[in-house]
Structures are given as C-alpha cells and as structure tokens.
Image: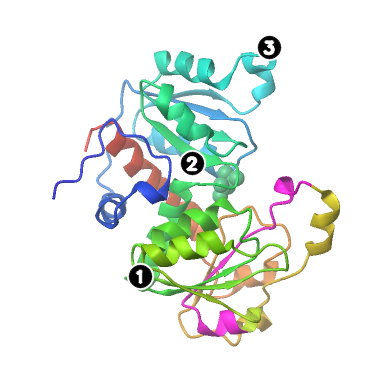
Amino acid sequence: MRVEFSGRDLISMRELSRQEIEHILNAAERTEFSGDMLKGRLMSTLFFEPSTRTRLSFETAMKRLGGEVVGFSKPGAASLSKGENLTDTIKTVSCYSDVIVLRHPREGAARLAAEVSDVPVINAGDGSNQHPTQALTDLYTIRREHGRLNVSVAMVGDLKYARTVRSLGHGLAKFGARLLLTSPPGLEMSEELCAELEGMGAKVEVCSSIEEAVENADVLYVTRIQKERFPDPEEYRKVQGAYRITPELLEIAKPGMVVLHPLPRVDEISPEVDHTERARYFHQVRNSIPIRMAVLTLLLGVV
Ligand code: CP
C-alpha cells in the first residue's frame, strides 16, 4: 500500500500506522537530502513553552534543506499578549508559511491548530499529551541500536506527565514491544493508557523496583520529572530526586542495553553515565536532524 504524507499534519503517534512509521524511519536512514530540496519554502516555529532541542533541530533541518524559518520562542512578544487567540494566530501564520511547528502547554492545542490551518501543522509538544517527532527520533535510535523495535524498553521516571513517554509508548506498541514501567509513587502511567497500549499490541509490565526494570531491558528510557506540570509544588518536592541512574546501577544490565533520555535532564542520570558505553542520549539529539528532515520533506511533498 502506498504511503502518502504530502499536506498532512503530524499531531499524534496514535494516528501513524506501523507502515507509516517505518516509511519515515527509512526516509531518515537514506539521508538522501540535498541542500535545495526545500528552497523557497518557509517554516514557522511557534513555541509557547521553552525548548532547546526541538526548536533548534527543526530550524537546523529546514535550513540544511535550503528553506527559511520565521517564528517566536517568547510568546509574550506576539500579539497573543494583546489578547489574540490561538485560532487567529494560526490562521494568520498559515497565510505566511508552508508548514507550522507548534509547541504549546495545552493538550489538544496542536489538534486545534491543524483544524484551522491551511498548511501542515507539526506538534512539537502539547502539554503532557504528545511529542511525535521526539518519538520518531527515539524509535530511529532504538532501531539503529538493535535493528528492530519489538524490544524490551524500561520506562523510568515520570510516566504521568511526560509526553515523550506517551508518544513513544504509542509508537512501540505498534511493533509489539514489551514495556517495563517503574516510577515514583504518584507518577505511574494511568491504567487507561496502559490498557490502550496493550490494545495496540504492547506487553505492559509494572516492575517492583528500578533494578528489575534495568536487568530485563534492552533499552532504558529515562525521563525528567516534569516539574512544570505539577498543580502543587509541594507534590513535586515529594518526588524530586526519587531516582538516579548511575554506572553502578547499570552493572546489572544486559550486554547491549542502552540508555536513552529525550533531554533535558536534571539529576536523573549521573554525568558519569555519559562516559559509559551505555549512553545514547546525545545520539538521540543527533538523530533528530535526519528525522525532522524526513518529516519536513514528506509533509511538504518533495519526496
Ligand atoms: N526533547 C525535547 O523536547 O527537548 P526540548 O524541550 O529542549 O525541545
């Protein structure tokens, strides 16, 4: 069956089939990108939340393909601060650009934007909901390491608020992966999401300790506790520093097990891990460029 991406939005990993995910990963792997593929095209980056990797890697990808970039990363400088709503902002920006990359604290904001935009919208993170290009980057990194995606992935940390966990879970489920969950009390993955992932093909297991997760995993996917999503700062203080990945902990891991993290990290992975053979989180950063190049060229219909 032919896979068609031209003109589509990318809002959630839920809506990508296994075949479509493989198509994007294969396009990134081929890296047959040339410096003028997106010449004359304009990408808008609208970031209503802080970002280092996502915004700069999208901009890098677009510029390396010959395209142009406009946008803002300080929403206070845009007319939203005068009371304009997101709908009017998106309708306006879609008059200028060929594709919109949107990060917003509200779940569903990217879906709303896609409904009113005349050009493709890429969700660069909407609250605790989805971050599909991060998930594609994670899948790409796992496939490069293990050659397959039906692996055992230990998901460690904030499984309640981390959108990267949710997006990656949806992606891995389509490949029949085993998900080993471990989190501080109060930050567990919801029963609803566990059931959804199992319904999509994942084997979901809750581990009684971080050691149990580490020793059974092919991939250790660590997340930061998402401080900014806690309604009550006191609740954050109760779980702050609850887990830390160290070289000593990784001694019980299987050969070939690798550590991923979408970053930014705070204190959940000790810097000493960076120097071990396990660390792959800066590989993820690098891998995000071919993935975002692939996504841009596919949605803009040039490949
Ligand atoms: N992984 C990720 O989304 O990082 P940023 O918040 O820096 O974009």
Judged from the image, the secondary structure of the residue bearing numbered disc 2 is helix
Q: Could you say where residue 235 lies in the image, as x and y percent from the top left?
A: 81, 56
Real-space CA distance between mark 1 and mark 3, rounded to the nearest whole angstrom? 48 Å
Q: Could you say where residue 289 lies in the image, as x and y percent from the top left?
A: 42, 46
Front in this rendered view, residue 86 or 143: 86
Q: Residue lying furthest left in this view?
A: 1
How many residues crowd around disc 2 within 10 Å: few (fewer than 14), some, or many (20 or more)?
many
Look at the image and give the residue range highlighted in magenta: 212-231
Residue at image location 68% in from the left, 83% down from the top: 248
Looking at the picture, which amino acid does disc 1 mark? Gly
Earlier-in-chain disc, 3 versus 2: 2
The answer to which quarter of the image holds residue 237 is bottom right
Q: Is residue 233 above or below residue 259?
A: above
The mark closer to the camera, 2 or 1, is 1
Any mark on residue 82, and which? Answer: 3
Q: Is residue 218 visible?
A: yes
Q: Which residue is mark 2?
A: 57
Front in this rendered view, residue 194 or 118: 194
Judged from the image, the secondary structure of the residue bearing numbered disc 1 is loop
Dots 1, 3 in contact, CB < 8 A = no
Q: Which residue is mark 1?
A: 176
Dots 2, 1 in contact, CB < 8 A = no
Q: Could you say where residue 154 lies in the image, as x and y percent from the top left?
A: 53, 73
